Image (spheres, rainbow, N blue to C red):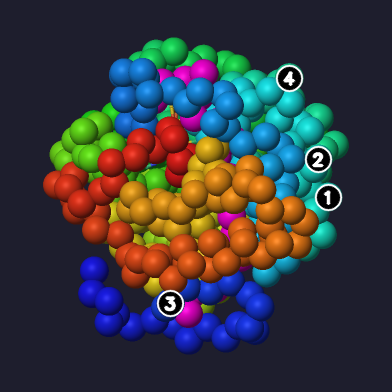
Amino acid sequence: MSQSMHLPVITHSKGELADAFSRRVTYLRVSLTDRCNYRCTYCMPQDRSDLLPRDEILSFEELEQIVRVFASVGVRRVRLTGGEPTVRRDVIKCVERLARIPGIEDVVMTTNGHRLVELAEDLARAGLTGMNISVDTLDPARFRAITRRGDLGSVVAGIKASMDAGIRPLKINVVALKGFNDDEVGTLCDFSWARGIVPRFIEWMPMSDGSLFAPGSLLTAAEIRALVQAHVGRPLEEDAPVAARVVVGPARYWRVKGEPHRKVGIISAMSEHFCDTCNRVRLSATGRLHTCLAHDDDVDLRRIVRGPMAGETKDAAILAAIRGALMGKRMGHEFSTTGCGGPRKHMVTIGG
Ligand code: SAM
Ligand code: SF4
């Protein structure tokens, strides 16, 4: 992508985080673990011999220290992801700690939903303010095939448990795959709308050096919109102006014309990219700061957190490393629809 592309003018005060293209950073995604109880075919390679040794993973104290530094310079939202965040031991305590940090307004989670019957109430009590639950298909056999072991019944029960626990907003994430779930786009919308939930369709991204990606399976944003329109028999109109997305997130929202309660989100990294409004960075479970999902550049914050400095000096060093990393944040991704141009890292290790 050209470095000279047009960027929105974003004003920000001096202390806040911004990259070299004046994109303000207010949102931190945190991978709590590289482990997962599912094995989704588009996310995780079959061979997982590279699982991280436990002592390389940040403790909650270490994570809290890093998040405090982010919060001190304007980060307001933290999303917990994985692998699967709910397989991290004591995840409830983690939510509690992060939700208490001054400045952090939202602690949200992206999960496969498998353990939510057990955890939803405690997560709500701990201060979780929103959740995205991944459901690619409503067919139990297909679900088992794409997740290589998942149980649709547990996830649907987990959605109900999260609603009963009062976790809002709740969204459903669907990776849209031609030849796999394109015939379910309408059904997944109905399933979500019947529960007052917004479904979000995600274009398949070629992570893992493209090794898991099948170009013919990419279902584009335009194709997804056409499938929704055909299903409802009415046109879609954009729900929010582009400017509003600067701080909201990567999804573009659409609503059925004249029916504002029937909304659909589409995350279209591939066919209608949104890099010019990117407001986020990602922290791996080992404390490496990735300023872009789609590139392998990272900066080691754990080295500073575990180093000899103390107190404010350590915080200042963490902040300096964060600012330095942000100066190297790329303008945009280089994904191509053939599967080239993506990073070597696996989605399961960085969490989407
Ligand atoms: N385990 C949790 C889950 O499945 O929701 C959180 C981690 S998962 C990596 C986060 C999101 O990324 C999920 O919605 C998942 O479907 C999506 N995802 C995984 N691999 C992807 C890929 N290659 N392209 C697009 N989305 C992907
Ligand atoms: Fe696990 Fe989520 Fe990746 Fe599926 S998408 S393998 S549930 S991390």
Does residue 274 belong to the magenta stretch? no
| Between discs 1 and 4, the one toward the N terminus | 1
Q: Which residue is drawn at 55% across and 50% down?
A: 301
Across and down, in percent, residue 136 comes to 43, 31
Q: Residue at x 44, y 13 (%)?
A: 149
As drawn, is 26 to the left or to the right of 217? right
Mark 3, secondary structure of its residue = loop
| Between discs 2 and 4, the one toward the N terminus | 2
Q: Name the residue under label 3.
A: 20
Tell me whether the residue at label 1 lies in contact with that at label 2, contact meaning CB atoms closer than 8 angstroms. yes
Tell us which disc is closer to us: 3 or 1. 3
Q: Which amino acid does label 4 sit on?
A: Glu
Across and down, in percent, residue 290 comes to 45, 52
Tell me whether the residue at label 2 lies in contact with that at label 4, contact meaning CB atoms closer than 8 angstroms. no
Q: Name the residue under label 2.
A: 96
Picture quadrant of residue 348: top left
Q: Nearer the viewer, residue 334 or 119?
A: 334
Position of 294 relative to 33 (above/below): below
Q: Name the residue under label 4.
A: 118
Q: Name the residue under label 1.
A: 100
Position of 291 relative to 205 (above/below): below
Q: Does the residue labelled 3 lie within 8 Å of ligand 1?
A: no
Q: Nearer the viewer, residue 28 or 253?
A: 28
Marks 2 and 4 sit apart, C-alpha to C-alpha, by: 17 Å
As drawn, is 211 to the left or to the right of 149? left
| Between discs 3 and 1, the one toward the N terminus | 3
Marks 1 and 2 sit apart, C-alpha to C-alpha, by: 6 Å
